[in-house]
Image: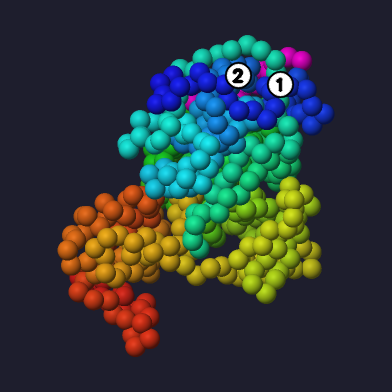
Amino acid sequence: MSAVIDPSQDGHASSPIGGASSRLRPLLAGTPLADGASRTLAFGPGGAVECARFEREVRALAARLPQARFAVNLCENRYRFLVALCAAAVRGQVNLLPSSRAPATVDDVLGRYPDSYCIGDLDLAPLPPRYLRMDETLDQLDGAPLAVDDAALVAIGFTSGSTGQPKPNPKTWGAFRTSTAQNLAALHDLLRADGVTEVVATVPPQHMYGMEMSVMLPLLGAIAVHAQRPFFPGDVARALADASAPPLLVTTPVHLRALVESRVELPALAGIVSATAPLPQELALEAEQRYGCEVREVFGSTETCVFARRRTAHEQAWTPLPGVRVCPQPDGTAIHAPHLPEPVALADLMEVEADGRFHLRGRAADLLEIAGKRASLGDLTRKLLAIDGVDDGAVFQLDEADAFGVRRIAALVVAPELDEARILAALRRSVDPVFLPRPLRKVAALPRNETGKLPRHALQALLHAQD
């Protein structure tokens, strides 16, 4: 293992690996603490990885982690993300899950949690501070079966910062176990009853939806996950073909639309799960007809995890998961769930029926959700205005959708001394690539009205005048 820091230091652990406690739970569900496991945890072009080997690799990495309280998990490969997450957890370290690998985002997390290091599997540039790079071939170490305390804080997920600074959302092992049991119940009719269900996911593991559906499910259920994160339709088709039986595809509306419109041939599927943005009913129906399986949409957030489901092709109302209550408030909705220590207030406006099902009636007008990630127009505009040399600017979303069904983000900028390439390069330091405005056009002045506001139609007209 190569590292910028000394990986041989003893880590700071709140509980020993496999130590004794009445609240300890196995790292892998269905794995007796007295011996190993034989089910498959991950699969891919490199073959299958069984639970016993996974535990040996987690144990070896945990013994080499540096001394720190927090680990910023930047792994791209889903299997290595799993190994890093669990190695930190059994050492009593907390995984920090930034919304992107943008240097400014990582720097912000490191600044807020100074007793931390970064761990990843890519040659990142620029290199993050205190970066530990995992080798492709992981060491293995025998030992006692691994367990984690139910009360242990194992991860902190971050909102995108759409209303300002990204907000941390702590998750304990017990909360993950409870929410995962709900997810398994919600998906039970899409899962194999006679063996392990294989999952291919296009969403990053750092995203809470990706965390729930492609990390916690294989740890705590009879699920095996593809080690990679396919993105383009051809890559998704190849990953699905690696499965030994019809797999479950965990994806987003953007990826699902790209698959449908590409006309790529997919193997037989057990089902499709979608989240991160509203799924158009016509797209859900077309996907069901093309791939011969159910498309199930799930609803959740970083703050709440998944708490509702629906079959979008045939129903508009959402069905809460067992034990979940949705309580409308004047400024949003309060979510009550067994895995939440207290109700969580969301900005979404919901209308609840007598049987508990609900309809989503609206949300913050400037919220953006693309490829499993969130941002807001207001926050993107603030980052644009923070660039030295930018006098004025606005980021907005176009009315027209592109070939993938995504409404592109555009920007108008007043910056006499900068060219468009330099402005985009500066934005790249703090903005995830999926939210970079394209097109970005320089103008002499923005069309502000007498109150200083920017009418949407005026922005659109000025943008098209620059084409």
The label number, if any, that marks residue 59 in the structure image: 2
Q: Which secondary structure, mark 2?
A: helix
Position of 209 relative to 284 (above/below): above
Instruction: Pick whichever, 249 or 110, lies toward us.
Output: 110
Location of residue 196 (image quadrant): top right
Location of residue 347 (image quadrant): bottom right
The label number, if any, that marks residue 18 in the structure image: 1
Instruction: Pick whichever, 15 or 262, lies toward us.
Output: 15
Residue at position x 47%, y 42% from top? 110
| Residue stretch in magenta | 34-47
> Which residue appears farthest toward the bottom when viewing the image?
450
Residue at position x 21%, y 59% from top? 420
Residue 82 covered by magenta stretch: no
Q: Residues within 10 Å of mark 1 (few under 14, many from 20)?
A: many
Where does the image place residue 177, in percent across and percent down from the top left?
72, 38
Where does the image place residue 414, in percent across and percent down from the top left?
24, 69
Task: Tell me which amino acid carries mark 2.
Answer: Arg
> Which residue appears farthest toward the right when viewing the image?
22
Position of 350 relative to 100 (above/below): below
Q: CA distance from mark 2 to mark 1?
A: 10 Å
From where the camera sits, is residue 40 visible?
yes
Where does the image place residue 144, in percent across and percent down from the top left?
70, 15
> Which residue appears farthest toward the top when viewing the image?
142
**Left or right of 108 in this view: 210:** right
Residue at position x 26%, y 65% from top? 390
Residue at position x 73%, y 32% from top? 149
Screen quadrant of the C terminus: bottom left
